[in-house]
Structure formats: structure tokens, C-alpha cells
Image (tube, helix red, strand yellow):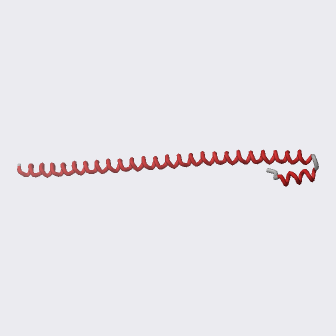
């Protein structure tokens, strides 16, 4: 706030009324300082809240990516299982067809 030297200079310059002016200026400077402190705290709170939301967004995004990868892996595994089953069925049908042809040729 106002230093003692500045207060003394105001007193000397303005006389007795200088004390009132110096105290008034000091009050104004304290109010400005308080406003600045509250503003700084408010900005810090806002920054913390924003960082929290960013972390939450990143977490949700990572979770979504993980769910997508898990689903993709599950679908790939299911496709492979179905493909293997189709190959088994095709192999069975080929063997059955060959057996039927050989059986027909014997008759």
C-alpha cells in the first residue's frame, strides 16, 4: 500500500488534510489489492475447474477408445470363429460330396 515515506510526503504537501487524503488513498489501494487477490483466486479456481474438465474429457475419450478397441477385437475374433466354422462346413460338404460321388459310381 502507501509507504510511510509517501504518507509523509502527502502530509507535508497537503498539511493536516493530507492525512485524510493519504488514508483515503491507502483504503483505495487496499480495496484494489483485495479485488486483485479475489480475481487471482477466482482465476485459479476457474483454471482448476477447466483442468478438471479437460482431465475428465481425456479420461472419457480414452475410455471410449478402449471400448472401441475391445469391441473391434471381439468382432475380429467372432469373424475368425465364423470363418473357421464356414471352412469346416465347406470341408464336410466336400467330403460328403466326394463320398456320395464314389457311392454313386459303385452302384
Taking the image as shown, residue 14 lies to the left or right of residue 68, namely right
| Percent coordinates x, y for residue 42 in the rendering | 67, 45
Q: Residue shown at 46%/47% (left/top)?
A: 63
Q: Nearer the viewer, residue 60 or 96?
A: 60
| Percent coordinates x, y for residue 57 in the rendering | 53, 47
Taking the image as shown, residue 57 lies to the left or right of residue 10, namely left
Q: Residue shown at 63%/45% (left/top)?
A: 45
| Percent coordinates x, y for residue 86 in the rendering | 25, 49
Q: Nearer the viewer, residue 49 or 38?
A: 38
Q: Residue shown at 85%/54% (left/top)?
A: 6
Taking the image as shown, residue 4 lies to the left or right of residue 12, namely left
| Percent coordinates x, y for residue 23 in the rendering | 85, 45
Q: Residue furthest right?
A: 15
Q: Residue shown at 36%/50% (left/top)?
A: 73
Q: Nearer the viewer, residue 30 or 4?
A: 4
- Report the label total: 0
Amino acid at each position: 500500500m502507501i509507504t510511510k515515506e509517501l504518507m509523509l510526503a502527502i502530509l507535508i504537501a497537503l498539511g493536516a488534510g493530507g492525512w485524510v487524503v493519504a488514508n483515503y488513498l491507502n483504503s483505495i489501494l487496499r480495496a484494489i489489492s483485495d479485488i486483485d487477490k479475489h480475481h487471482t483466486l477466482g482465476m485459479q479456481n476457474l483454471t482448476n475447474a477447466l483442468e478438471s474438465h479437460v482431465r475428465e474429457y481425456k479420461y472419457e475419450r480414452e475410455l471410449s477408445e478402449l471400448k472401441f478397441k475391445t469391441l473391434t477385437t471381439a468382432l475380429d475374433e467372432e469373424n475368425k470363429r465364423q470363418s473357421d466354422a464356414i471352412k469346416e462346413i465347406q470341408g464336410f460338404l466336400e467330403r460328403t460330396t466326394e463320398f456320395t460321388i464314389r457311392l454313386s459310381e459303385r452302384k
